[in-house]
Amino acid sequence: MCTRCLRPVTVCYCASLPRLETTTKIVILQHPRERFMPIGTARMASLCLPQTTIHVGMRWSEHAALAAQLSDPDRPPILLYPGPDAKDILREPPQGPVTLVVVDGTWSQARRVMRDNPVLQALPRYAFVAPEPSTYRIRKEPSDEYVSTIEALMHVLGALEGDPARFRSLLDPMRAMIDAQIACQASSPRRSTPRVVRTGPPRRPLPEVTRWDDLVVLVGEANAWPYSSAGDGPRDELVHLVLHRPATGETFARVIAPRRPLSPTAAHHTGLSEERLRAGAPVADVLADLARFVRPTDLIAAWGHYGTSLVVDLGGTLPRPCLDLRAAAYRFHNTKIGTLDEYARSFGPVPEALTEGLGGLRAALLAQVLAAWRVEFDRERRRA
């Protein structure tokens, strides 16, 4: 592996990297799932542009380093992201040096980051229509006018720095990567038989999963309105919260009265009728009940970060750190594991829901996953 571009040496693109100094400071906010994408271009851009900083994460309201960068009086921040109020940066670039903030990820990931971060929504917004098609032949964009992160920086920095021709060299490492990737794929024989995907418990359990008595599964269901490509729609709000402590069989389940109009799809996605949702408990009562149920020693286990984020957005407090079971399953199987429903059902029949709604079923599925992992853990411990 090349320690600079983090690519196999056979497809390393470092020989094609230019070094382009800029008066513009560049801040790339990278979605965690994009961090180790082998054909991503954010790292490539950072290697070409010394004034670039990459931060990895999803929530930025309390990020001290980013706050400092956004507070630079000599380089006021602007956000590169489309929206109804976005100025065309190629036609109306801001005057003077700026701090350019770019969200790196798939378009669906970027929309979620924008939706969940008021600190980004408050920035002056700029966008552009790509003057030429993307050359990113090895990764499908949602639409022909979309471009990769490094291509976007090529166009935008050309306008901000007043020298579009100088930044054309940003495409050199991208072309080198694409050509090497295509050549590598062409030289590799196709598999004659489908790859066998191993299901079942992970090859070895996480150290945290041995805290069986502390584990509490959590599922949060939301009143979620569709949002535009600009990320300007209303934030998802928690309307059904289910926690289950497998060691004792205790289940905490609350339907929470929506604070905003119900989405047309809320009943479908939660498995609860509109009448049941509207009859939910007040937020203050639910938070008080939650505080009484959760123990400081609990290890909250959820499928991804969505459910725990909904609780935090509501004003709830959870013991930290939380355990991401989806990431754990992926990491230890080292292969795609599908949805929670698909993964849990690899262990046996669908369990009975712990409480009403889809939240009750998903909590049961999470408990089934943990039970299967514990069986495997105990079996391996006996062998040892």
Image (tube, grey):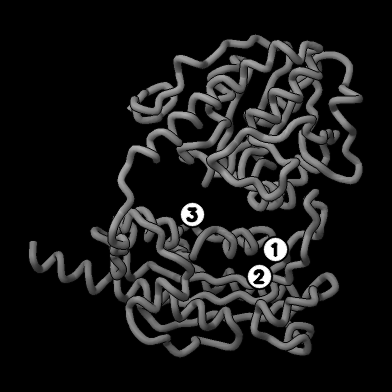
Q: Is residue 297 visible?
A: no
Give the vertical position of 158 relative to 287 (above or below).
above
- What residue does disc 1 label? 314
Quadrant holding the N terminus: top left
Q: Is residue 367 visible?
A: yes
Give the vertical position of 99 relative to 225 (above or below).
above
| Among numbered discs 3 and 1, the one appearing first in the sequence | 1
Left of 80 or right of it: where is 103? Answer: left
Residue 107 location, x and y as percent?
67, 48
Going 56% across and 43% down the picture, which residue do you hit?
139
SS at circle 3: loop
- What residue does disc 2 label? 287
Q: Residue flagged by tag 3: what amino acid is it? A: Arg
Circle 2 Cα neighbour tier, 10 Å, few/some/many (<14 / 14–19 / ≥20): some
- The one of 380 and 102 positioned closer to us in this rendering: 102
SS at circle 1: helix
Going 66% across and 77% down the picture, which residue do you hit?
269
| Among numbered discs 3 and 2, the one appearing first in the sequence | 2
Marks 3 and 1, how far apart at CA: 17 Å
Q: Residue flagged by tag 2: what amino acid is it? A: Leu
Circle 1 Cα neighbour tier, 10 Å, few/some/many (<14 / 14–19 / ≥20): some
Q: Which mark is residue 138?
A: none
- The one of 260 and 128 positioned closer to us in this rendering: 128
Q: Mark 1–mark 2 contact, CB under 8 Å?
A: yes
Quadrant holding the C terminus: bottom left
Residue 273 location, x and y as percent?
72, 88
| Among numbered discs 1 and 2, the one appearing first in the sequence | 2
Circle 3 Cα neighbour tier, 10 Å, few/some/many (<14 / 14–19 / ≥20): few
- What residue does disc 3 label? 320
Going 43% across and 56% down the picture, which residue do you hit?
327
Residue 226 location, x and y as percent?
77, 64
Going 91% across and 25% down the picture, which residue do you hit?
92
